[in-house]
Image (cartoon, helix red, strand yellow):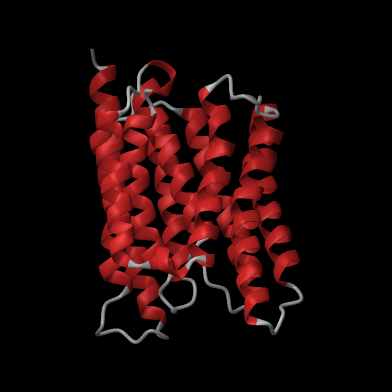
């Protein structure tokens, strides 16, 4: 990699999503309303724009503006980001959708039944593993982000995104790894903004956008690259394991120990997934 390529990677893959996530999130929340209805709307906008908006902008700057309709698999990723954020907004505005039984029905219906009933072949082949991963990630992250402890949700999503970037890069999907890195840095920018403007809950649009993006990237890595599906399922297991870690009753909701525990659980299981992908890539290169 030349010095020019390194500078371009740092500029578009790190600085752009970091700055976009910070500025957009802070702008939305700078003048927080006292009206409960307006606060709900601000929460929706901050999540949707702070994560999905920062990602779409950053991918456009790094790879060019995606075509509509999408011509390449990567062009579907901004659509996935906006669709996931939109689903999160709907969940936020319709409390009935937050019911755990409704979430379970969504997981079973979309993650298990849908890939077995629809002819997902050819260019749509990546949707088969992606929808299963999405259902696991979305059902898990929405619970983790609903925990009242500050920073639990965004730390879990940030580490999960970083592990996804490392997993994809380790298995040879460098472009997808860079795009997953954009998600991680957009979350970091939003996290820094939330330090300046506290009182944020990441349940809803942010968790929906992150779940849709990571699932789509991992699904494309499986279908069109050498990403082992077993490693992606372990990574999704990191999000699932974060649920009991984030709601553990022996730790006070206000304690920073909960943040450390969730971060450690996600990082450990995510690290196992990355090691599995790296091992599989090394084994394939020996032949």
Quadrant placement of the C terminus: top left
In the picture shown, does residue 275 fall above or below 241?
A: above
In the picture shown, does residue 112 fall above or below 207?
A: above
Total marks in image: 0
Q: Position of residue 243 (x, y in %)?
A: 30, 66
Q: Position of residue 195 (x, y in %)?
A: 62, 74
Residue 9 quadrant: top right
Q: Residue furthest top?
A: 287
The foreground one among 63 and 79 is 79
Q: Residue at x 24, y 85 (%)?
A: 250
Q: Residue at x 36, y 76 (%)?
A: 258
Q: Residue at x 38, y 27 (%)?
A: 126
Task: Tell me if I can see residue 268 in this picture.
Answer: no
The foreground one among 64 and 106 is 106
Q: Position of residue 131 (x, y in %)?
A: 36, 39
In the picture shown, does residue 120 fall above or below 129?
A: above
Q: Residue at x 68, y 34 (%)?
A: 60
The foreground one among 38 and 179 is 38
Quadrant placement of the N terminus: top right
Task: Tell me if I can see residue 14 in this picture.
Answer: yes
Query: Does residue 97 appear left or right of residue 196 in this picture?
Result: left
The foreground one among 125 and 234 is 125
Q: Position of residue 37 (x, y in %)?
A: 64, 76
Residue 4 quadrant: top right
Query: Does residue 178 appear left or right of residue 132 in this picture?
Result: right
In the picture shown, does residue 102 fall above or below 280?
A: below
Query: Does residue 53 appear left or right of residue 244 in this picture?
Result: right
Residue 100 quadrant: bottom left
């Amino acid at each position: 990699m030349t010095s020019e390529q390194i500078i371009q990677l740092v500029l578009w893959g790190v600085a752009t999503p970091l700055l976009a996530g910070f500025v957009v999130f802070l702008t939305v929340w700078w003048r927080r309303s006292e009206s409960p209805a307006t606060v709900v709307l601000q929460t929706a906008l901050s999540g949707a724009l702070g994560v999905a908006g920062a990602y779409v902008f950053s991918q456009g700057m790094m790879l060019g503006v995606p075509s509509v309709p999408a011509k390449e698999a990567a062009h579907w990723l901004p659509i996935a980001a906006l669709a996931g954020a939109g689903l999160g907004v709907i969940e936020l505005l319709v409390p009935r959708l937050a019911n755990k039984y409704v979430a379970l029905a969504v997981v079973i219906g979309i993650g298990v039944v849908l890939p077995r009933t629809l002819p997902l072949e050819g260019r749509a082949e990546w949707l088969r593993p992606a929808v299963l991963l999405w259902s696991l990630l979305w059902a898990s992250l929405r619970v983790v982000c609903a925990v009242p402890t500050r920073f639990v949700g965004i730390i879990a999503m940030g580490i999960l995104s970083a592990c996804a970037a490392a997993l994809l890069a380790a298995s040879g999907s460098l472009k997808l790894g860079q795009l997953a890195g954009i998600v991680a840095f957009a979350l970091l920018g939003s996290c820094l903004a939330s330090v300046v403007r506290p009182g944020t809950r990441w349940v809803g649009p942010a968790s929906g956008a992150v779940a849709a993006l990571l699932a789509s990237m991992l699904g494309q890595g499986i279908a069109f690259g050498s990403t082992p599906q077993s490693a992606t399922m372990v990574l999704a297991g990191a999000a699932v394991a974060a649920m009991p870690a984030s709601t553990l009753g022996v730790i006070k909701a206000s304690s920073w120990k909960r943040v450390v525990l969730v971060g450690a659980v996600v990082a450990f299981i995510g690290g196992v997934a990355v090691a599995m992908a790296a091992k599989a890539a090394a084994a394939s290169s020996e032949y």
